[in-house]
Image (cartoon, rainbow, N blue to C red):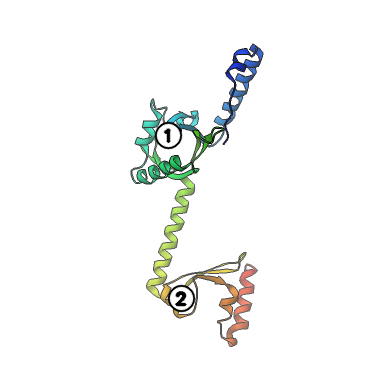
Amino acid sequence: VTEIEFDDRWIASATAAERQALEDRESHFRAFIDLMAEAHWAADADGNLIESGERWLRQMGNPNKPCAYWKGALHEDDRSRVDAAWRHSIASGDPYHERYRLRLPSGAYRWFRARAAPLRGADGRILKWYGTLEDVHEAEVARQELQSAQQRYALAARATGDIIWEWEVADDVICRMADPALLASLGLAADDDRGSWMARIHPADLDRVRSGVRAIARGN
């Protein structure tokens, strides 16, 4: 993000029509932003929230002190991680990108994704931070459920001594879930291509297996 400055002398000397045109453009820009799915916010160079978009304020019940409300609404299990990441960005100037839970006025928590980038002056100093806050609750819950299912399958595979595999046809990669020691004893890696797997099949079984693989590839 780069700095945009308006010369105070120009504003003072501008005609009423020019000032009105500038105000109209600003109103148009703010209306456009308010239509976006993400809520917008700004912070000073030290990371203190100084401006909150109307969408975020409405979603949070229009708190009188948005900064204090945000800190209090942040889920306690996310606070240390979020605070550390924000302090790192403030100190380094690196873009900010975190996911965390916020408590809504109803008392329920929802997952949000926050992103921010610094506004720098001509000398490279950080003047402000501009960011967005996006509701990603459904996507995050689905991701966690998928991760939990994968962990359960992996535990089941280790407990039974089975190898659960998945073939990513587009990339021709075989992904396996099993006890690492079992994979190692069979000379298998957690993921490799189909060719390395086919090379281990007994010659007497190879034609039958190839036929079955072709049928799978056709969707049968």
The quadrant holding residue 170 is bottom right
Q: Quadrant of the N terminus?
A: top right
Q: Quadrant of the C terminus?
A: bottom right
Q: Which mark is residue 63?
A: none
In the displayed orientation, state which residue is furthest to the front. 123
Other-residue count near label 1 (Cα within 10 Å), few / some / many at <14 / 14–19 / ≥20: few
> Is 13 above or below relative to 220?
above
Q: Which mark sits nearer the N-terminus, 1 or 2? A: 1
Q: Indicate the position of residue 80 as horizontal and vertical percent values.
A: 35, 45
Q: Quick check: 4 left or right of 90?
A: right
> Is 140 above or below relative to 220?
above
Q: Tell me the residue that label 2 is attached to.
A: 183
> Is 73 above or below relative to 184?
above
Q: Tell me the residue that label 1 is attached to.
A: 46
In the displayed orientation, state which residue is furthest to the bottom. 204
Q: Indicate the position of residue 118 as horizontal and vertical percent values.
A: 51, 37
